[in-house]
Amino acid sequence: MPANPPPPLLKRVPPGAWTAFAWCAGTAFTYLTRIRLPGEYEPDHLPAIQLYRWDGVVLLLVATGLAFSAAALLSRRPLTAVGLLLTAAVAQTTTLAAVEIPLAQFLAVQTAVYFIAAGRPRRTGVIAVSLSLALLVGYMAVRILYGWVVGTSAELAVALVTLIAWLLGDAAHRSRTHAQQLAARTAEQAVTAERLRIAREMHDTVAHSIGIIALQAGAAARVAATRPEAAREAMSAVEHEGRETLAGLRRMLVALRHADQGADAGDGQQASLAVGLADVERLAAVTSAAGVRVHLHWAGERRELPPDVDLSAFRIVQESVTNVVRHAGARSCRVTLDYRAADALAIEVTDDGRGRGSVTDTGFGLAGMRERVALLDGEFTAGPRPEGGFRVAARLPIPVAVGLPVVAR
C-alpha cells in the first residue's frame, strides 16, 4: 500500500506555534495602534508605558514568557496553558491604560480555545472557554467594584469572539469524530462484504465439485462389477476433483485468516481471482466426463476482460452448469459466450431438462448470480424455456478501454 500523502504545510504547524504567533501578532497590533500610521492624523490610542518605560517593557517580557510557556504546554496540559495565557493577557493589559482587556491581548487565548475544543474531549473545551469567559466577567466586576470605568461593549465583543472560537473548534471536533466513525463503519462493511464474497466463492466451488463427485461416484458404483477400468477412471476423477476442491478451500481459508489478522484484502482477491473464463474449457471437460456433456460455443473475438467481469462470468457459467448437473436431469447443456458486442459480454446457458432450476435451487445459486450481475450493472434472466428445459442469460458490461484480444490459455 502506498504511504499516505503528507498533510498540507499549514496543518503540520502545531497548535502551540499558532498560539505563539497569535500572541506576537496581538502584541504587534497593539504597538501599531499607538503610533501614527500613514494616512492617519493621530494614533488610535494614546501611548502607554508598555514600550516607553522600563517597567512596562519588563512586564511585557514577563507576559510574553508566560505566553510562550503556555504555547509549549498546550499539547500536554491544555488547561494549564489556558491559565498562563489568561495571566499573560491581564499582565499585558495593565501596561496599556485600557478600561477592558482588548481583543488583541485575548487573541492567543481564543486561538488556544479553538485548538483545545477541536482536539480535546468536549469537557476540556468547555472548561477552557468557561475559564476565559469567567476571567472577562471577573475583570469587569473588579473594575466596577472599585468604581473604575469599564469598556463593557468592547469586552462583550471579546467574549463573543471567544465563544465563536470555541464553537468553531467544537464543530471541527464533531466533524472529525464523525469522519472517524464513518471510516470505521466503512472498514467493517468492507470486511463483511469480503467475507460474504469469499463465502459465495466457497459455495460455488463446493457445490459444483460435490455435484461432479456425486455423478462420478454413482457412475463408478454402477459399473464397478462389469467395467472395473471405467470404475477406476471415475474414482480417479473423484479424487482429482476432491483435491482441486480442497486446494480452493485452502486458498479461501488463508484469505479469511489474512482478513482476521488485519492484512490487506489483496491476498484474498488473488486467491479468488485465480479463475476466469480461461478455465471454462476445463470446467466443460470435467462436467462432460461426469456424464453431463457441455457444448461450449464462443461467438466473436475473445478479448481481455476486467478481473471482476472475468471472475463473475466464470462463476455464472459454473453455477449454471452445476444446477444442470444437480437439478435439471439433462444429459447435456449448451454454454454460449458472446463477445460480438463491443461494450458487453453475453452469457447463455441452456439445457433440455425438467426446467425446474428456479424451483429446486438452493437459494444461493440464482440469487448469487443475480447479485453478481447487479453489482456490475448488468442484466440477468433465468427461467424455464417454452420448448422445455431451463435458460440462464446474463449481459455483463465491459468498459470501452478494455478491448484487447486475448489468446485462450
Image (cartoon, grey):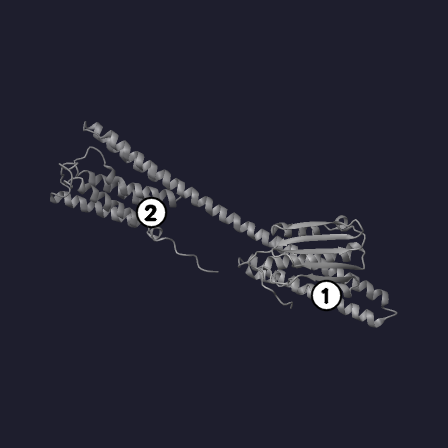
| Marking on residue 59 | none
Categorize mark 2 by other alpha carbons within 10 Å: few (<14), some (14-19), many (20+).
few
| Marking on residue 241 | 1
Q: Residue 163, percent across and down? A: 33, 36
Q: Is residue 137 above or below residue 232?
A: above
Q: Earlier in the sequence, mark 1 or mark 2?
A: 2
Q: CA distance from mark 1 to mark 2?
A: 66 Å
Tell me which residue sits at (31%, 36%) in the image: 161
Question: Quick one: 263 or 356, which is closer to the camera?
Answer: 356
Q: In the structure shown, which secondary structural element does the residue marked by tag 1 occupy?
A: helix
Which callout, 1 or 2, points to the residue nearer the camera?
A: 1
Categorize mark 1 by other alpha carbons within 10 Å: few (<14), some (14-19), many (20+).
some
Say what amino acid the circle numbered 2 marks: Arg
Find residue 300 and report its image quarter: bottom right
Q: Does the rendering let one see residue 137? A: no
- Residue indicated by mark 2: 77
Q: Residue 77, percent across and down? A: 33, 47
Question: Quick one: 305 or 142, which is closer to the camera?
Answer: 305
Find residue 140 and report its image quarter: top left
Find residue 293 and report its image quarter: bottom right
Q: Does the rendering let one see residue 61? A: yes
